[in-house]
Amino acid sequence: MNRKTPTLIGAGVGLAVFLAIGLLPALLYGGYAGVLLAGGFVGTPVQPTLFVRALIVFGMALGVVGVGALFAVAGAAAGAAVSILTARGEKPVASETKA
């Protein structure tokens, strides 16, 4: 089995776990960060203008992408670790070259 395959499977599992348990908190905390960012730019209390809404959506998108990347990298690392731990003493086959 190729060494890259378990890593890709682990990344896929990590993203699936993110979609199952991490998407809603990432949206929530990203939106909160967007509100804080908008409050820093326009002052508090925040009025619902187009600029403020754009900052909040930007914060939500940044939260989703950041946490999703974290889950994918953690899943890929777990997949690589599992592939290394389950290798049963398999030795790589040396390629023979005849001149």
Image (spheres, rainbow, N blue to C red):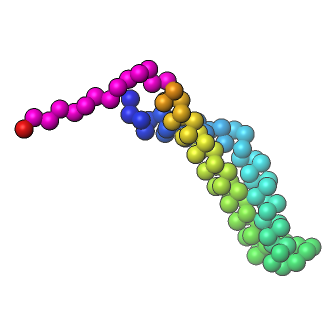
> Is residue 94 in the magenta section?
yes
- Left or right placement of residue 34 versus residue 92 in this view: right
Q: Nearer the viewer, residue 13 or 50?
A: 13
Compared with 28, 33 (above or below) is: below
- In x, y percent, where is residue 63? 71, 57
Quarter of the image for the N terminus: give it: top left
Which image quadrant for residue 14?
top right
Q: Nearer the viewer, residue 54 or 99?
A: 99
- Left or right placement of residue 7 versus residue 98 in this view: right
> Is residue 65 in the magenta section?
no
Q: Is residue 53 visible?
A: no
Q: Residue at x 83, y 67 (%)?
A: 36
- Give the main secondary structure of the magenta stretch: loop
The residue at the far left in this view is: 99
- In x, y percent, where is residue 89? 41, 21
- Left or right placement of residue 21 versus residue 98 in this view: right
Quarter of the image for the C terminus: give it: top left
- Left or right placement of residue 1 versus residue 27 in this view: left
Q: How many numbered discs?
A: 0
Q: Which residues are magenta?
A: 86-98
The residue at the far right in this view is: 45
Compared with 89, 74 (above or below) is: below
- In x, y percent, where is residue 24? 76, 47
Which image quadrant for residue 45?
bottom right
The residue at the far top in this view is: 88
Q: Residue at x 14, y 35 (%)?
A: 97
Q: Residue at x 77, y 74 (%)?
A: 50
- In x, y percent, where is residue 41? 80, 78
Q: Nearer the viewer, residue 2 or 25?
A: 2
